[in-house]
């Protein structure tokens, strides 16, 4: 055998972690992890909500100078309220926030001046920075007037309001370039058709300014279902109000507030098709707030009752059985529209009551009922999803949008096939991704020279170890890189391997009757093990072995302490095979490049059955996820 290292096998599917790898649903209450691959958005009006009156929600331990201070308390993380909010988002797959922080009518001091600024700018900047650090995107949510039909919207001068908001976001993003606001989400919902054209004028003035001065900013508007049927003549065209809005700005958040999923589809299908055809985006929002008795048939506009009637044992779980649940409907909408370019993602309205569905109480009540009346994130330590892993692309400005992720495939060891120098090798970049677009090109380099420009090329490599660099370029011209190590084994003849095929002569003759009749990477019995793996792990290459015949791993209790028991088998005469065995560990299975796996110095305990020997290791149970493998290396 040759002197090049040969790394084999055994990347185990079992891993150990204090946060178990999970499917989407892990329970229906409190901090049960909800790991939905299509991360959700959420409207956030009052992040420190408490059961009580409007005034009680506005105040939290008020002072004489600040009687309405609940928002300020949240910004300062009073009693851990901001930590609770972000932990909840990470625990429930919430990646996009429409976060309320401006009203034109009440914030003119900040907005209506020569240099418009976002209200509470320093505090809001800190909030956005914390959100971004957790993989969360933030939009500035606002509205113009407390009365959505306020006649002042008809005054020409007041039609500057949305433009001033755009200027404020533009100025904010200049001042905070590494933690930008994604865009502006406007929740102005007039019902009086006489002011519709004024709202459209206001949007157009804002969008014209954005197009000329800050084209990366996206303006979004909440879309009322009734607008789909209200034809308005504006700018010389007569069409539904929703379509006028989508002609004017880039994003709409459809208030698909109905507990009948077929009704929702009837509402949003036309506007999603329209958005797709016009290169715009639509998100779809479901209501979960308590609307009991607020107006006739208000119960039909929310999933409040349906969620409350679900047993905790299955709450928030997709269930094929009737009746249709909240999550049935959420998943149905995604599966129906996810392939359309105009569809953004699902939105939940809104934080306070959605939290209550999980915890049985509003966020501030939950905090006050904790020991010492304070939420301590490190003590609660809830399970969290990786919000950067998201099947839905982000829209709007985001620090997360940009470079693609390159994956160059797993390291490979190539055996000699023809007794000639060099071998053909297939490279694989198919796992490369781009969160906001697509991969446009691939480039593979060996020692600085380009060797291929396709996704899965077959290339010729000389004997030896090669570090191949993959560069992928996305449709925005941004790049990502990764490396893969390819070892090409030269023909090597030793006293125990006279034909140089990597298989021990005695073992090869015993099992196959002659030398050179089988390749080391063949699977002669169809059990998933190559002939080389069968040899070094003491298996029979002519009998199908089970998948766990060579390695076993489990947790065991040793004197009250959880440990990992890892063991592998080898033949008693393994020394004649000219190989050695080494236990290795890693915490990162996504990139198998150099340095990712480290040698574990633990000494194994030996046992045998007269034919094969088991090498058993007892290892501490790691707090972080850990992968284990047995590396087989030539000993000569």
Image (tube, helix red, strand yellow):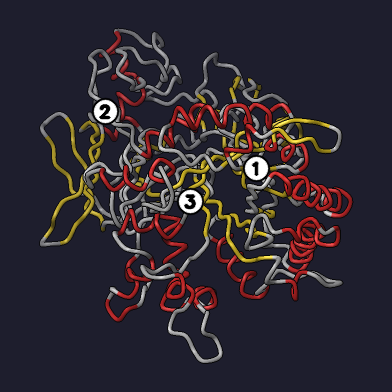
**Number of numbered discs visible in the structure rendering:** 3
Q: Is residue 438 visible?
A: yes
Compared to 258, does 277 lie above or below?
Answer: above
Residue to which mark 2 is pinned: 321
Q: CA distance from mark 3 to mark 2?
A: 25 Å
For label 1, count other residues whose C-alpha is less than 10 Å away and answer few (under 14), some (14-19) or many (20+).
many
The residue positioned farthest toward the bottom in the image shown: 64
User: Which residue shows up at 65% across the image and 59% down it?
Assistant: 143
The secondary element bearing badge 1 is classed as strand
Image coordinates of residue 302 in percent, x first then y, are 41, 45
Residue to which mark 1 is pinned: 252
For label 3, count other residues whose C-alpha is less than 10 Å away and answer few (under 14), some (14-19) or many (20+).
many
Image coordinates of residue 233 in percent, x first then y, are 79, 35
User: Which residue shows up at 65% across the image and 22% down it?
Assistant: 459
Quadrant where the image shows the C terminus: top left
The secondary element bearing badge 3 is classed as strand
Residue to which mark 3 is pinned: 349
Q: CA distance from mark 2 to mark 1?
A: 33 Å
């Amino acid at each position: 055998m040759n002197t090049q290292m040969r790394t084999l096998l055994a990347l185990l599917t079992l891993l150990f972690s204090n946060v178990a790898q999970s499917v989407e649903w892990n329970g229906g209450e409190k901090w049960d992890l909800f790991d939905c691959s299509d991360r959700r958005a959420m409207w956030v009006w009052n992040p420190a909500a408490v059961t009580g009156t409007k005034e009680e929600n506005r105040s939290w331990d008020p002072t004489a100078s600040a009687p309405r201070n609940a928002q300020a308390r949240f910004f300062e993380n009073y009693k851990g309220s901001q930590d609770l909010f972000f932990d909840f988002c990470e625990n429930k797959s919430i990646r996009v926030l429409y976060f309320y922080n401006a009203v034109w009518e009440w914030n003119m001091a900040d907005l209506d001046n020569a240099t418009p600024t976002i209200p509470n700018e320093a505090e809001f900047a800190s909030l956005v920075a914390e959100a971004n650090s957790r993989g969360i995107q933030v939009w500035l949510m606002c509205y113009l007037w407390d009365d959505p039909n306020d006649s002042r919207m008809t005054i020409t001068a007041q039609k500057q309001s949305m433009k001033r908001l755009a200027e404020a976001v533009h100025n904010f993003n200049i001042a905070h370039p590494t933690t930008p606001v994604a865009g502006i989400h406007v929740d102005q919902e007039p019902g009086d058709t006489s002011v519709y054209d004024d709202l459209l004028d206001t949007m157009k003035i804002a969008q014209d300014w954005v197009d000329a001065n800050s084209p990366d900013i996206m303006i979004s508007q909440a879309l009322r279902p009734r607008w789909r049927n209200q034809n308005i003549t504006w700018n010389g065209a007569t069409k539904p109000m929703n379509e006028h809005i989508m002609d004017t700005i880039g994003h709409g958040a459809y208030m698909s507030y109905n507990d009948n999923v077929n009704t929702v589809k009837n509402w949003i299908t036309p506007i999603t098709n329209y958005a797709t055809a016009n290169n715009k985006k639509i998100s779809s929002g479901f209501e979960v707030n308590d609307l009991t008795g607020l107006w006739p048939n208000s119960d039909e506009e929310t999933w409040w009752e349906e969620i409350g009637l679900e047993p905790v044992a299955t709450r928030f779980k997709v269930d094929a059985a009737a009746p249709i649940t909240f999550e049935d409907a959420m998943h149905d909408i995604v599966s129906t529209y996810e392939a359309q370019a105009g569809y953004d993602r699902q939105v939940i309205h809104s934080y306070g009551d959605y939290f209550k569905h999980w915890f049985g109480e509003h966020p501030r009540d939950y905090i006050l009922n904790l020991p010492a009346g304070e939420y301590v994130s490190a003590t609660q330590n809830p399970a969290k999803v990786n919000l950067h892993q998201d099947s839905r692309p982000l829209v709007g400005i985001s620090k997360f949008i940009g470079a693609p992720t390159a994956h160059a495939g797993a390291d490979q060891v190539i055996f000699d096939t023809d007794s000639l120098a060099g071998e053909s090798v297939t490279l694989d970049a198919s796992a490369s991704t781009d969160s906001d677009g697509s991969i446009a090109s691939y480039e593979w380099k060996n020692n600085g020279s380009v060797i291929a420009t396709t996704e899965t090329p077959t290339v010729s490599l000389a004997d030896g170890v090669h570090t191949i660099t993959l560069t992928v370029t996305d449709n925005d011209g941004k790049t990502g890189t990764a490396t893969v190590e390819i070892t090409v084994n030269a023909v090597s003849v030793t006293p125990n391997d006279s034909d140089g095929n990597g298989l021990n002569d005695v073992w090869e003759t015993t099992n196959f009757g002659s030398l050179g009749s089988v390749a080391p990477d063949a699977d002669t019995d169809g059990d998933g093990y190559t002939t080389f793996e069968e040899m070094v792990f003491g298996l029979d290459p002519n009998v199908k072995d089970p998948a766990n015949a060579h390695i076993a791993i489990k947790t065991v209790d040793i004197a009250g302490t959880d440990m990992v028991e890892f063991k592998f088998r080898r033949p008693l005469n393994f020394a004649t095979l000219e190989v050695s065995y080494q236990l290795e560990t890693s915490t990162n299975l996504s990139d198998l490049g150099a340095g990712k796996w480290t040698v574990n110095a633990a000494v194994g305990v030996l046992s045998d059955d007269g034919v094969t020997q088991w090498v058993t290791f007892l290892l501490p149970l790691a707090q972080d996820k850990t992968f284990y493998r047995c590396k087989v290396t030539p000993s000569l």
